[in-house]
Amino acid sequence: MPDLADPKQPLTTIGGEVPNLHERPPGCPFAPRCSKVMDRCVSERPPLEPRSPGHHAACWAGRETT
């Protein structure tokens, strides 16, 4: 997400191709392009959870419980 407080800050990109939204994979749509991918990423979609005030993420990496 862009930082609205600092709009000149460059965005981080993710290599690879964006998945077809009409044929979404069963797991995380970022799994094929993620440097932190785990086995469960390709089969289970992570839930959207709060990570800090005003910030939510859907990612198995960094979760307290797995």
Image (cartoon, helix red, strand yellow):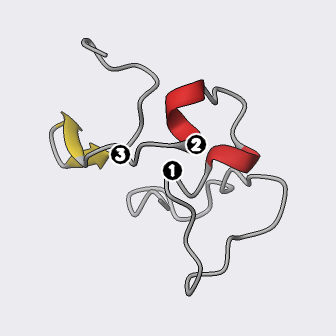
x%, y% of residue 43?
50, 43
Residue type indicated by callout 1? Cys
What residue did someone put label 2 on? 42
Q: Nearer the viewer, residue 42 or 30?
A: 42
Decide if residue 10 is on the left or right side of residue 39.
right
Asked if labels 2 and 1 touch by Cβ distance under 8 angstroms, the answer is yes
Q: Dot 3 lies on which element?
A: loop
Decide if residue 20 is on the left or right side of residue 4.
right
Name the N-terminal-most of marks 2 and 3: 2
Quadrant hosting residue 46: top left
Q: Which mark is residue 11?
A: none
x%, y% of residue 44?
42, 43
Residue type indicated by callout 3? Ala
x%, y% of residue 58?
35, 45
Asked if labels 1 and 3 touch by Cβ distance under 8 angstroms, the answer is yes
Asked if labels 3 and 2 touch by Cβ distance under 8 angstroms, the answer is no
Q: CA distance from mark 2 to mark 3?
A: 13 Å
Q: Dot 1 lies on which element?
A: loop
Q: Nearer the viewer, residue 42 or 49?
A: 42
What residue did someone put label 3 on? 58
Q: CA distance from mark 3 to mark 1?
A: 8 Å
x%, y% of residue 63?
32, 20
Picture residue at 56% right of the left edge, 58% below the top: 29
Picture residue at 66% right of the left edge, 80% below the top: 20
**Relative to 60, does residue 44 appear above or below in the rendering?**
below
Q: CA distance from mark 1 to mark 2?
A: 6 Å
What residue did someone put label 1 on? 28
**Relative to 5, does residue 45 appear above or below in the rendering?**
above
